[in-house]
Image: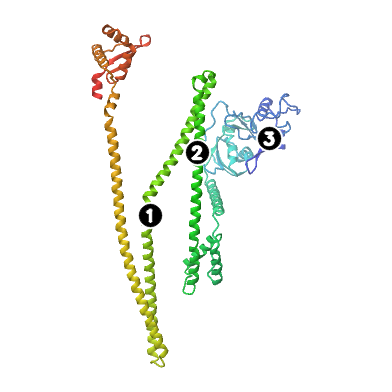
Amino acid sequence: MFLVQYTADNSRTLNVDSTAMTLPMSDPTAWATAMNNLGMAPLGIAGQPILPDFDPALGMMTGIPPITPMMPGLGIVPPPIPPDMPVVKEIIHCKSCTLFPPNPNLPPPATRERPPGCKTVFVGGLPENGTEQIIVEVFEQCGEIIAIRKSKKNFCHIRFAEEYMVDKALYLSGYRIRLGSSTDKKDTGRLHVDFAQARDDLYEWECKQRMLAREERHRRRMEEERLRPPSPPPVVHYSDHECSIVAEKLKDDSKFSEAVQTLLTWIERGEVNRRSANNFYSMIQSANSHVRRLVNEKAAHEKDMEEAKEKFKQALSGILIQFEQIVAVYHSASKQKAWDHFTKAQRKNISVWCKQAEEIRNIHNDELMGIRREEEMEMSDDEIEETTETKETEESALVSQAEALKEENDSLRWQLDAYRNEVELLKQEQGKAHREDDPNKEQQLKLLQQALQGMQQHLLKVQEEYKKKEAELEKLKDDKLQVEKMLENLKEKESCASRLCASNQDSEYPLEKTMNSSPIKSEREALLVGIISTFLHVHPFGASIEYICSYLHRLDNKICTSDVECLMGRLQHTFKQEMTGVGASLEKRWKFCGFEGLKLT
């Protein structure tokens, strides 16, 4: 017997069962048909091919490699077949029973929805005399059987080791089974194989899904870790040696960013104290020295950008000049002197080229005009903002001076408090010593008092300067408000002037618009409209244009049919055209709809 074995990756291998080769062939023609459907040359009793002209390289089933006549065939369960290919089922001989295929004209047996992770099948329609050994004999070639639960009511449940084995077992659904050669009803039955729902299958499937989810989470975590940017290098702790290194790096333009980051980290950590304040101040001062360099670099980049813009504008204007020359060539070629000498195809190409060149020229011209408008807008904005910028710079300078004075005032206050504390400490020490040998202490006290008096005088001067700067700031704020009010008044005046100009332009041409929009252009057309309206009012079912013109020719022979039809077509709310009749008698008729049009207009 020929068997199909499925490996772990669900691939098929063909093997020969030596014990099954001794089975008799009751119907040689059925065996030849089955082998032909599988794309193999069937062998006769003597080992010769039954089909002499069979080519083993041409298989009927797609996906099967070229097969030699000596390769083994398939067993009771063939490989999966595409759904659009008809399946021909053959008789299957087993040791204790025979399986007969169902009628190929009948629809395939119905199955329920496949449960997740299904490894168990329901087998119904078993013979009453069927035993568990016969069930194993029939279904063990579909795959490894783990358990069989047989019922007394001619059905059983079979659980396989893998899920793909269930698909092979479903192939046997619809087969008629006969035990031995008996025709007794108890020895026959029709197999019905369907999916079955089992808790063990569902549990294994859930465990597998959880394992796959864990693998997916692990894979995502590894991917995130791979894509995560590397953490910045750790900043060293503050020391005098490291401080000197950072100070040297701050002076170097190429290492400035790294040194500034280190300085920022030290300040945020709270490394600044009385002992290290001078070092930090020198580093901050060296960092401030780079401001001028950065401003100069920005100015250089802006200059480069302006030069690039100017070059682009010059190049674009040169391209436009060349486009104008090309379009002029096309226009001169389109004149009659040269145009008559070209063929029809050449004329067509020249006209197409001319249109394309004009379109590209217009696009580039619009782009150049847009650049010029942007430059004009920037110039106007600069002129308006010049006065405001000067005032803002003055104001910002005063504000910065006021802030500096505030900081100096605060520092002087803190120094004064410190001196007071020191004086109190000295007084306490003086009281404890009971004024023994105090000439030096008295001198120190006098010096401290003189220093305090000098600090107080300096503090008073700083306060007076601070008050003066505040008064100047208030004056500048008042001036700024007045300038803003003047700008708003100027903008309102400009908007009012533009509105007046627009209203004057609209008022100059109202009559022309009304004259141009009137559908009746002369008194003669008004008379024709009145006559036609009267004529059509008498004919409520409408009249053709020839009938209307024949009536008008009695009044004036110079009336043209096309002029009448054009006039009636312009007056859509007075006349309307309808199609009447069927087939050969189909004609166009005009009707008077003035009363309905009066309601609409």
Give the structural element (helix, strand or loop) at label 1: helix
Precedes in sequence: disc 2 or disc 3: 3
Q: Which residue is mark 3?
A: 2
Determine the residue positioned at 48% across, 63% down: 288
Number of other residues with Cα within 10 Å of mark 1, as a class: few under 14, some 14 to 19, many 20 or more? few
Precedes in sequence: disc 1 or disc 2: 2
Number of other residues with Cα within 10 Å of mark 2, as a class: few under 14, some 14 to 19, many 20 or more? some
Tag 1–tag 3 contact (CB < 8 Å): no
Looking at the rendered structure, the kind of residue marked 1 is: Glu
Looking at the rendered structure, the kind of residue marked 2 is: Leu
Determine the residue positioned at 28% across, 44% down: 493
Give the structural element (helix, strand or loop) at label 3: strand
* Farthest-out residue, front: 337
Q: Nearer the viewer, residue 422 or 299?
A: 299
Q: Which residue is mark 2?
A: 316
Residue 428 x, y percent position in the rendering: 38, 86
Residue 182 x, y percent position in the rendering: 62, 30
Q: Which residue is mark 1?
A: 389
Number of numbered discs overlaid on the protein picture: 3
Number of other residues with Cα within 10 Å of mark 3, as a class: few under 14, some 14 to 19, many 20 or more? some
* Farthest-out residue, top: 554
Q: Nearer the viewer, residue 566 or 281?
A: 281
Residue 7 x, y percent position in the rendering: 65, 42
Q: Is residue 462 above or below residue 125?
A: below
Q: Is residue 595 left or right of residue 29?
A: left
Of badges 2 and 3, the one in the foreground is: 2
Give the structural element (helix, strand or loop) at label 2: helix
Looking at the rendered structure, the kind of residue marked 3 is: Phe
Q: Is residue 391 above or below residue 128?
A: below
Location of the N terminus by quadrant is top right
